Image (spheres, rainbow, N blue to C red):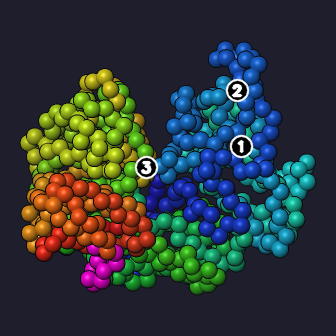
């Protein structure tokens, strides 16, 4: 990927661009016709074409016929190891023609998936968006997207190149504006051999405005490859204050309009715990031609966070003319961590804190994330990872720290999984394992992992969110064969000792803990009562306004867990108060979207 570095008109900004990314578009926003297949079904009325015949691995008929098109996940697509589909977002469903994975082996020399009739009466400037994968591995024909007004005569509007990653679909359908009956057909051939498959997702028809810039994605991280060392460019969700470097947010922009966007400028603001801490001037980036793919820019600054808390970046794009300003702004957040319970124990992480998938199994493995150390003198205290409840009691695990070349640096002691560990894993609570020597880290890249050691049962590490290829790995077997993951293991590096923060509980109240941090929809509050007492829980914002109050009632002595719904709260920082009689405890609650 090429990057051009330009100095913006006001120092100290560096504008890095242009880069393009193929990820899912914002689903169904502004679409008058859409399909994302997340319900696991092909939409009612779509024509899947004739059934295809199952065959043996030698190509002999089994006299069984199955649908050519199915809806599934990345794991189902790659069931036989021949059709690797990026799992973006985690657990994503898509429609596919897969000639190898169950229920086939099948020959798919000519298969097509056709929508129901679409009414374009009164529609103008219609275009098609979506994404697809067409590996074309063993001579498979190029996939096409076609349009017809009568279901018999088809015009090709998009030809898919052979690619192994998701690529965007953008096709101009304005030639069919106003037509009362229009069909879309997705056509693929395996070329007469078992080639692998074809995947399709996030289909959207929308009307283009004359001028329409859209912010597709904002991230707090930069845009360089994870394999490029010496710079902090990953999309961190947690970053220790001692490792915080100059802020370099990124934005992806798509010109959905009919015309080129002129006079385009980007600006951004940053807040820390709700207080403005940084504001950029408007930085011109030139003109953006109509159509895709999305283009992106990173804005480098000399500003570095100097305090703990929730850092929120909001980026806005403007143009000389834009007919829809509702999609010109995006935001992302990152927690600046430090010592102590509420401050995250100096955690460094790229996962999003909400369990979305798993990686692991019964083989020996290491699930690891790349961490970029940029400042001298940090001591690696320990590593935490979410071991899911589907793992087995009695299996041996340990934390492991490796350098950029996967050379051993340090490990924790071996840990035997307990039922308590798995119970905690069910609710997203991480297992923390201190490293043996607490090595001081020099600047450079490190791999931080949870390792399943010799055993007979299964161990699974939760994944959360997606990262670029090179950011996360799965190392398996005696030779530690490396597979680069798109799903991010919930494994974090801690530069502060995990447990210091118990002393932060205030006013003599009971010890309490919130997880996961940050929260998204549900958060668990665990606390221990020394004696039987009445309990009340409150959530207040940074201004001290009470937003939630719940009288739990009388509880006996011992450990308790309360589940709180925070899905309606905006992203930001809050305080959870646990009140028992005349004393109370409080802990910071971070909500990220």
Residue bearing the label numbered 1:
143
Depth order, front residue of 393/192: 393
**For this rendering, which residue is in front, 452 or 184?**
452
Count residues near mark 1 (Cα–Cα under 10 Å), then give few for <14, some for 14-19, many for 20+.
many
Q: Which residue is mark 2?
A: 106
For the residues bearing labels 1 and 2, Cβ distance under 8 angstroms: no
Q: Is residue 461 left or right of residue 486?
A: left
Residue drawn at point x = 73 percent, y = 34 percent: 67
**What residue sits 62% from the left and 80% below the top?**
324
- How dense is the environment of label 2, judged by Cα within 10 Å: few (below 14), some, or many (20 and up)? many
CA–CA distance in space, label 1 to label 2: 18 Å
Q: Earlier in the sequence, mark 2 or mark 3?
A: 2
Mark 1, secondary structure of its residue = loop
Note whether residue 138 is visible.
no
Please tell me whether mark 2 or mark 3 is closer to you in this view.
Answer: 3
Is 497 in front, or is 219?
497
Left or right: where 144 falls relative to 41? right
Horizontally, is 60 left or right of 514 in the view? right
**What stretch of residues is rendered in magenta?**
538-548
Q: Which circle's residue, 3 or 1, is located before the other in the chain?
A: 1
Which residue corresponds to the image point at 70% horizontal and 72% vertical from the top-left? Answer: 208
Label 3: which residue? 356
């Amino acid at each position: 990927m090429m990057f051009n570095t330009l100095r913006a008109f006001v120092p100290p900004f560096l504008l890095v661009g242009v880069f393009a990314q193929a990820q899912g578009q914002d689903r169904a926003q502004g679409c008058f016709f859409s399909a994302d297949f997340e319900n696991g079904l092909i939409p009612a009325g779509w024509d899947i074409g004739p059934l295809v015949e199952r065959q043996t691995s030698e190509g002999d008929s089994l006299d069984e016929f199955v649908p050519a098109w199915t809806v599934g996940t990345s794991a189902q697509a790659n069931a036989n190891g021949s059709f690797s589909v990026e799992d973006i977002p985690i657990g994503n469903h898509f429609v596919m023609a897969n000639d190898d994975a169950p229920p086939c082996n099948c020959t798919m020399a000519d298969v097509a998936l056709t929508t129901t009739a679409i009414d374009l009466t009164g529609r103008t400037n219609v275009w098609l968006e979506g994404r697809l994968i067409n590996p074309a591995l063993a001579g498979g024909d190029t996939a096409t997207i076609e349009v017809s007004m009568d279901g018999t005569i088809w015009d090709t509007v998009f030809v898919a190149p052979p690619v192994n990653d998701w690529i965007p679909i953008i096709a101009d359908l304005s030639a069919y504006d106003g037509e009362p009956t229009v069909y879309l057909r997705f056509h693929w051939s395996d070329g007469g051999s078992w080639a692998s498959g074809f995947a399709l997702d996030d289909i959207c028809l929308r009307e283009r405005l004359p001028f329409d810039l859209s912010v597709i994605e904002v991230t707090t991280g930069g845009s360089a490859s994870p394999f490029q060392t010496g710079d902090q460019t990953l999309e961190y969700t947690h970053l220790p204050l001692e490792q915080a470097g100059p802020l370099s947010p990124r934005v992806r922009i798509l010109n959905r309009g009919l015309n080129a966007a002129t006079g385009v400028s980007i600006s951004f603001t940053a807040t820390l715990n709700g207080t403005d801490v940084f504001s950029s001037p408007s930085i011109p980036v030139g003109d953006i031609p109509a159509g895709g793919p999305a283009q992106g820019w990173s804005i480098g600054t000399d500003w570095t966070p100097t305090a703990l808390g929730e850092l929120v970046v909001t980026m806005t794009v403007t143009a000389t003319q834009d007919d829809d300003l509702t999609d010109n702004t995006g935001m992302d957040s990152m927690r600046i961590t430090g010592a102590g319970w509420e401050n995250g124990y100096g955690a460094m992480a790229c996962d999003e804190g909400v369990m979305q998938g798993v990686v692991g199994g019964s083989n020996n493995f290491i699930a690891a994330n790349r961490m970029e150390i940029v400042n001298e003198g940090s001591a690696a205290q320990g590593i935490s990872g979410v071991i899911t409840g589907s793992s087995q009691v009695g299996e041996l695990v340990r934390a492991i720290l490796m350098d950029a070349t996967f050379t051993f640096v340090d490990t924790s002691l071996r840990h035997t999984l307990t039922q308590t560990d798995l119970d905690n894993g069910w609710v997203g609570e991480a297992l923390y394992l201190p490293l043996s020597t607490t090595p001081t880290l020099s600047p450079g890249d490190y791999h931080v992992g949870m390792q399943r050691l010799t055993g007979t049962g299964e161990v699974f590490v939760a994944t959360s969110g997606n990262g670029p290829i090179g950011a996360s790995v799965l190392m398996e077997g005696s030779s530690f064969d490396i597979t680069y993951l798109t799903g991010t293991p919930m494994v974090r590096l801690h530069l502060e000792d995990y447990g210091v923060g118990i002393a932060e509980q205030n006013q003599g109240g009971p010890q309490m803990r919130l997880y996961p941090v940050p929260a998204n929809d549900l958060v668990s509050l665990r606390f221990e009562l020394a004696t039987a007492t009445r309990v009340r829980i409150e959530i207040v914002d940074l201004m001290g306004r009470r937003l939630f109050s719940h009288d739990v009632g009388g509880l006996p002595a011992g450990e308790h867990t309360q589940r709180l719904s925070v899905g309606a709260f905006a992203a930001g920082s809050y305080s959870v108060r646990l009140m028992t009689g005349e004393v109370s405890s409080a802990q910071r609650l971070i909500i990220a979207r």
